[in-house]
Image (tube, helix red, strand yellow):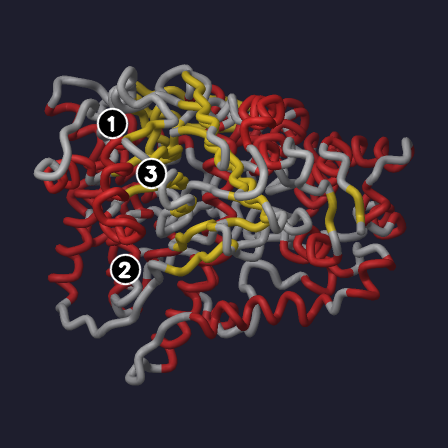
């Protein structure tokens, strides 16, 4: 796992910008604290920072072979199969997956990505052909941003690195304002928020040549007829999940797992513990809690019970070396700024900062961790999949707040942006993009739309969060449920199967019933834990009041009078998903102010 960056031009000498590249590299050091490297050619600069996980000595980058040079951020889970397939054409000098990725590209060209099972963002420079190949993994676990000046392409894993290049504007226009106030912490796929900055979309790849940038989609969720009984489907799911978790345990450094006591992390921990036990090793598991949560927790529809008793149950059941990380409320608020540094954008407020602090502690126990993200999107775990009224609502089910959000837009952008049309058009494009079959029932038709909406929006927000908050502490987090084979298969499993016994993720529960105690197996879904301490609301309210009183940059973009109403706690509208309401909305505006000032963002 690493950070990558670089620049390519066919009319300028890239070797002259060494100091700029050093700044770009420095901005990625948290992402790759172990090693750094750089290759400068006349037309191309390739920059790398490395978190060493596989082949510590042999996997250094940039890596060159003949006329090709690669910088790569990711992990392949079918490395050995590909290596065996390539051995007839190449010798191998390392056992790193980087060498396998590079030689796969040399043999198969751009179609190499069709063969990869993993998470990745990569760039390969071909000195003879004078072209740069860019690619991103199917699901979008690893990031890759770029800016095309017309004569030069600049790319980086993260926005802060990209912004170190003087040709990248520190500006937002009306589109950027709409993303920040109408969509965030979600983001339109491919949009980098900064004016002119784009992101290679998940499942896309392509070339930058003297003729410009040409990217194309190489993977998407495709609809096909599935003719399997429920029993066969459950067996198929079990095989896929087990294979994915086992593949993702491969590492030359210590591996641990997140353990919340919920279905997804408990399943991953159970499989991981069994695999390590075969090797005579004990799994390390970690969970997060908040000071005073037991005192202030109140059961709700979204969060019916708290995690500790289920965590204790699983740790005892598996016999893991378990560690419970307890976060302080004041630290959550303090880390809001660091979370912006990590994400490169304002994000999910304390939902981000808590993950950042949690990952900082996890890093003390391992360099690689497995986490349960994406099972809800793929297996249909969220309330908006299962509540018929929410499910059939025409719009993003996790953010029915456009009218509320639009109140905050400053007059300048409010005149330019039709808020309702901006959000609804994005929703409609995604829903229409979902591939369906002519014989789909109205329910199956809608569930395909719901899956596609979650894939392109809600899931991307959570993957951004997990990647940036973990890599900020040099921690690699793997997400076994994001195996593209699981996603492809489940897209075509009937909703009747997924909703087995009328329970969220009922199919997954049935398929993996041998791996968990009953208490955890049938526990009602509970989201990522957050603080319930009212002190957090007091702290962020005081901080935002200080920003407004001191003349922060925030009111250039956001209406002051609406912020004042927010500070009087007149609003308590759900901002995003299940976790972002009044305290998180105030904290989001704190993050937005910090972002505007930290990166000196101008409004154009």
Give the structural element (helix, strand or loop) at label 1. loop
Q: Is residue 28 visible?
A: yes
Residues at circles 1 and 2 in contact by the CB criterion of under 8 Å: no
Crowdedness near tag 2: few (<14), some (14–19) or many (≥20) residues, C-alpha within 10 Å: some
Q: Which residue is under mark 1?
A: 96
Front residue of 465 and 412? 412
Q: Residue lying furthest bottom in this view?
A: 438
Give the structural element (helix, strand or loop) at label 3. helix
Give the CA separation, mark 1 to mark 3.
28 Å
Q: Which residue is under mark 3?
A: 265
Give the CA separation, mark 1 to mark 2.
28 Å
Residue 185 coordinates in the image, percent (x, y): 60, 48
**Which of label 3 and label 2 is nearer to you?**
2
**Which of label 1 and label 3 is nearer to you?**
1
Residue 281 coordinates in the image, percent (x, y): 18, 18
Residue 444 coordinates in the image, percent (x, y): 34, 75
Give the CA separation, mark 3 to mark 2.
21 Å
Q: Which residue is under mark 2?
A: 488
């Amino acid at each position: 796992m690493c950070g990558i960056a670089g620049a390519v031009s066919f009319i300028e000498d890239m070797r002259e910008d060494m100091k700029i590249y050093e700044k770009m590299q420095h901005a990625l050091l948290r992402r790759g604290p172990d090693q750094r490297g750089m290759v400068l050619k006349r037309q191309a600069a390739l920059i790398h920072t490395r978190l060493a996980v596989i082949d510590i000595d042999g996997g250094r980058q940039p890596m060159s072979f003949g006329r090709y040079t690669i910088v790569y951020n990711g992990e392949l889970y079918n490395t050995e199969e590909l290596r065996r397939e390539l051995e007839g054409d190449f010798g191998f000098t390392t056992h790193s997956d980087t060498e396998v990725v590079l030689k796969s590209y040399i043999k198969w060209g751009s179609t190499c990505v069709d063969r990869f099972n993993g998470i990745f963002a990569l760039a390969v420079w071909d000195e003879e052909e004078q072209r740069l190949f860019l690619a991103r993994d199917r699901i979008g676990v690893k990031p890759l941003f770029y800016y095309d000046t017309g004569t030069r392409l600049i790319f980086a894993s993260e926005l802060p690195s990209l912004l170190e290049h003087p040709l990248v504007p520190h500006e937002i226009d009306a589109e950027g304002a709409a993303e920040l106030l109408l969509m965030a912490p979600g983001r339109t796929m491919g949009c980098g928020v900064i004016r002119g900055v784009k992101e290679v979309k998940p499942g896309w790849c392509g070339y930058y040549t003297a003729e410009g940038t040409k990217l194309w989609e190489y993977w998407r969720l495709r609809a096909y007829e599935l003719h399997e009984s429920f029993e066969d489907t459950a067996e198929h799911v079990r095989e896929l999940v087990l294979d994915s978790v086992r593949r993702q345990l491969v590492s030359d450094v210590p591996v641990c797992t997140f353990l919340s006591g919920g279905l997804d992390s408990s399943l991953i921990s159970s499989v991981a513990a069994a695999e390590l036990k075969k090797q005579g090793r004990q799994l390390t598991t970690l969970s997060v809690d908040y000071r005073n949560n037991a005192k202030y927790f109140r059961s709700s529809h979204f969060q019916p019970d708290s995690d500790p008793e289920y965590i204790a149950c699983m740790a005892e059941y598996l016999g893991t070396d378990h560690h419970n990380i307890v976060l302080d409320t004041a630290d959550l608020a303090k880390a809001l700024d660091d979370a912006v540094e990590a994400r490169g954008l304002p994000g999910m407020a304390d939902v981000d900062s808590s993950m950042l602090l949690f990952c900082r502690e996890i890093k003390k126990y391992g360099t690689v961790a497995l986490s349960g993200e994406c099972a809800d999107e793929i297996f249909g775990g969220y309330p908006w999949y299962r509540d018929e009224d929410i499910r059939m609502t025409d719009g993003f089910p996790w953010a029915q707040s456009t009218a509320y959000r639009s109140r905050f837009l400053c007059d300048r952008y409010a005149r330019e942006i039709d808020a309702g049309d901006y959000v609804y058009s994005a929703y409609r494009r995604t829903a229409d993009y979902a591939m369906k079959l002519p014989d789909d029932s109205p329910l199956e038709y809608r569930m395909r739309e719901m899956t596609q909406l979650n894939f392109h929006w809600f899931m991307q927000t959570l993957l951004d969060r997990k990647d940036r908050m973990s890599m900020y502490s040099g921690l690699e987090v793997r997400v076994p449920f994001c195996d593209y084979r699981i996603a492809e298969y489940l897209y075509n499993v009937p909703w009747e199967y997924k909703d087995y016994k009328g329970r969220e993720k009922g199919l997954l529960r049935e398929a993996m019933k041998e791996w968990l105690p009953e208490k955890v197996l049938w526990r009602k879904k509970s989201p990522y834990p957050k603080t319930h301490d009212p002190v957090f609301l007091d702290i962020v309210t005081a901080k935002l009041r200080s920003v407004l009183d001191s003349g922060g940059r925030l009111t250039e973009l956001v209406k002051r009078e609406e912020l004042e109403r927010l500070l009087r706690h007149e609003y308590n509208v759900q901002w995003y998903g299940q976790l972002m309401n009044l305290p998180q909305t105030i904290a989001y505006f704190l993050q937005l102010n910090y972002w505007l000032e930290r990166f000196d963002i101008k409004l154009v």
